[in-house]
Each structure stands twice: as C-alpha cells, then as structure tokens.
Image: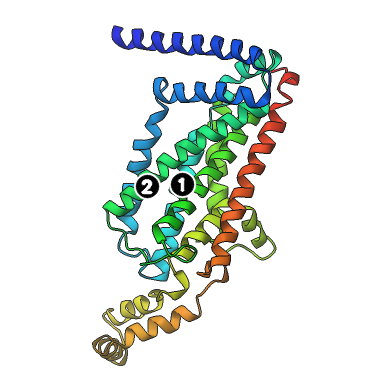
C-alpha cells in the first residue's frame, strides 16, 4: 500500500513539475506554432507517466470480443455484414470517445491559468489533435492486427486502391479519430470529468440509434443519420465489404425454421429439402438480396471517398468548435 502511495505522489510531482515547465515555456514562446510542440511534448509525457498507453490493450480486448461474434458472417451475407459493420463502428466510437473525453475538463483550471499567461487555445487544441491522431493510429493498428490474427473474412481487393487492408485501415482510423474529436469537443465544453462521463453514454446511444444501421428511422427524421458519424462510418465499412453483392439469408432461414416445425406442410418440407439438394437455395438468397440493396452501401470509389471526406470534415469542425468554446474559458465563473 505504501509503495502505491509513493508511486502516486511521484506521478503527482511529475505532473506538477510538468505544469510549471509548460507554463514557463508558453510565456517564452508566445507564437501559436512555437507553442504546439510544448503541449504536444506534455501529452506524450502523459502517455508514458499517466498510463495513457492503456488504451491500446483495451482496444485489443474489445476487438477480440467483437471479432469472435461477427467472424462467421462478416463479408459472407448481408445481415452478418450489416451487424458486423455496426459492431466495428461501435469499437471505433468506443475507442475514440474514451481517448479524449476527460483530457480537457480534468485540467480546466490549468488551461484557464495558462491561457491568461499567454497560451493560445488553438495551439493547445492542435497539440491534442496531433496526439490523439497518434493514439488513434495505434488503436487502429491493434484492431487490424486482431482482424488478421482471427482471420476475419475479407474481400480479396479494395475499391479505391485495390488494397482492401489499406482502405479498411483508413476507414477505421477516420471513424476513431472523428469520434475522438467529438469527445474532445465535449471535454472542452463541460466543466468536470463527472459531467463528461455522464454525457458520453448518451452521445454514444444517439450515434448508434440514428446510424440507420439496425433501426429503421421514422419518416421525417431519417435525414438525421446524415449528421451521424456512425452512419457514414458504417456505410464505408459495408461498401468496402461488398454488402450489395452478398446474399441475403434471413428469408431462407425463416422458411427453414417453418419447415422444421412439427406441423409444417409436407410441401414446404419437400421444397426446402429439394432446393438445398440442388443448390436452388443459394439462387433464392441472391434474388432476395437484390431487393435489399442500399444505395448508401454501394461499393464504388466515389461513395467510399465521399464517406472519408465527410468524416474528415466532421473531425475538423469538432476541433474548431472546441477551440471556440475554450476561447471563452476566462469568462467561466464556475
């Protein structure tokens, strides 16, 4: 117990010394560009001394759990690909949210004090943007490693670059980073870590419900999904996984379930048996898939690049709003 207390005191001393060093340097280097490396260095020191590196094994654990569930159906049939795309999007959202949900609000008083001493808010946020990109790259590499290790079924080639792994890496990275910037915005607006952790589940729930992936949105509000980063991320994943070219198995599974019941019509049982013996069930699944295609999931270069650009734009907008919100920190009386 004593060793733990000593270690915590040492970390607090390091944090206090780092705060003093950062503040003194910000006074000397008043230019916006010259301040960025100062705060970037502070963030990287926190990666080592404040255990920010723990987000990497956490990403691996979450990925293993998700891949265990989706492995048998992702890029195999429409339904499995849709659920797998949503699950992978959830992994990215979870990673991104937890990366930065507390980074600003936990040191809000420090930010206020350093801002009055000459710190530029834009330099502070840009340093966080660079550092969070570093974390997101590490997390995405971890996810891709798990996908390859677990041998998740993937297309043989990509759509944009002819390299599926590269395109999938870019998509997962952009979803994670966009979620990270949204979380950074929330952390810049709220005034305590408690408020941040309270808001985060609500934001995550909104992203999942209004993604349009699993739940059909009522008419009149279906356009809301275009404002959801989860919707564009899942669309990119499903487009890369060739959703529209895959068979649909839900109808056939229901028919087989009916044929397996005790009081099923003999004609239904005979039809199912003969269709499976002749391979007609696969033809039926393909026909069913033709009526379930989605324009948002088209496996075209223009569609995937469009989703990437939207995620990039969202990321910079979130960061910009975070800067605007923090610029008013001196007026905060709480």
Residue at image point 64% right, 27% down: 33
Q: Quadrant of the C terminus?
A: top right
Query: Residue 136: horizontal and vertical position, in percent?
Result: 46, 40
User: Mark 1 Cα within 10 Å, few/some/many (few <14, many 20+)?
Assistant: many
Residue at image point 35% right, 67% down: 156
Quadrant location of residue 121? top right
The tag on residue 221 is none
Query: Residue 30: horizontal and vertical position, in percent?
Result: 68, 18
Question: Can residue 200 be seen here?
Answer: yes
- Label 2, secondary structure: give it: helix
Residue at image point 46% right, 42% down: 94
* Label total for image: 2
Give the residue pinned by disc 1: 92
Query: Residue 188: horizontal and vertical position, in percent?
Result: 63, 30
- Is residue 203 rendered to the left or right of residue 95? right
Q: Quadrant of the N terminus?
A: top left
Residue at image point 27% right, 85% down: 276
Quadrant location of residue 260? bottom left
Marks 2 and 1 close (CB-CB < 8 Å): yes
Q: Earlier in the sequence, mark 2 or mark 1?
A: 1
Foreground of the two, 89 or 24: 24
- Label 1, secondary structure: give it: helix
Foreground of the two, 37 or 44: 37
- Is residue 151 rendered to the left or right of residue 174? left
Whole-angstrom CA distance, mark 2 to mark 1, is 9 Å
Question: Can residue 191 be seen here?
Answer: no
Give the residue pinned by disc 2: 143
> Vertical placement of 112 versus 2: above or below?
below
């Amino acid at each position: 117990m004593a060793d733990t207390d000593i270690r915590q005191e040492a970390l607090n001393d390091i944090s206090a010394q780092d705060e003093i060093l950062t503040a003194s340097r910000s006074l000397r280097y008043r230019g916006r560009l010259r301040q960025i490396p100062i705060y970037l260095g502070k963030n990287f020191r926190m990666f080592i001394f404040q255990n920010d590196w723990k987000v990497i094994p956490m990403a691996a654990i979450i990925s293993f759990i998700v891949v265990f569930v989706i492995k048998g159906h992702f890029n195999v049939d429409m339904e499995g690909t849709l659920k797998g795309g949503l699950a992978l999007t959830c992994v990215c959202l979870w990673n991104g949210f937890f990366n930065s949900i507390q980074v600003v609000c936990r040191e809000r008083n420090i930010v206020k004090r350093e801002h009055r001493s000459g710190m530029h808010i834009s330099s502070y946020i840009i340093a966080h943007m660079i550092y969070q990109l570093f974390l997101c790259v590490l997390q995405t590499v971890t996810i891709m490693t798990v996908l390859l290790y677990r041998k998740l079924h993937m297309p043989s080639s990509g759509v944009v670059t002819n390299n599926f792994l590269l395109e999938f890496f870019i998509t997962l990275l952009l979803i994670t980073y966009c979620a990270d910037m949204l979380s950074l915005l929330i952390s810049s607006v709220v005034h305590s870590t408690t408020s941040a952790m309270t808001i985060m589940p609500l934001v995550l729930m909104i992203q999942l419900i209004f993604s349009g992936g699993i739940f059909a949105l009522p008419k009149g509000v279906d356009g809301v999904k275009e404002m959801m980063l989860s919707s564009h991320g899942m669309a990119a994943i499903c487009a890369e996984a060739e959703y529209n070219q895959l068979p649909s198995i839900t109808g056939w599974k229901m028919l087989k379930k009916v044929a397996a019941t005790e009081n099923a019509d003999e004609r239904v049982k005979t039809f199912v048996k003969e269709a499976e013996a002749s391979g007609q069930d696969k033809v039926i699944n393909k026909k069913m898939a033709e009526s379930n295609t989605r324009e948002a999931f088209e496996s075209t270069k223009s569609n995937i690049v469009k989703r990437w650009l939207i995620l990039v734009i969202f990321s910079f907008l979130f960061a910009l709003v975070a800067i605007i919100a923090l610029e008013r920190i001196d007026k905060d009386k709480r």
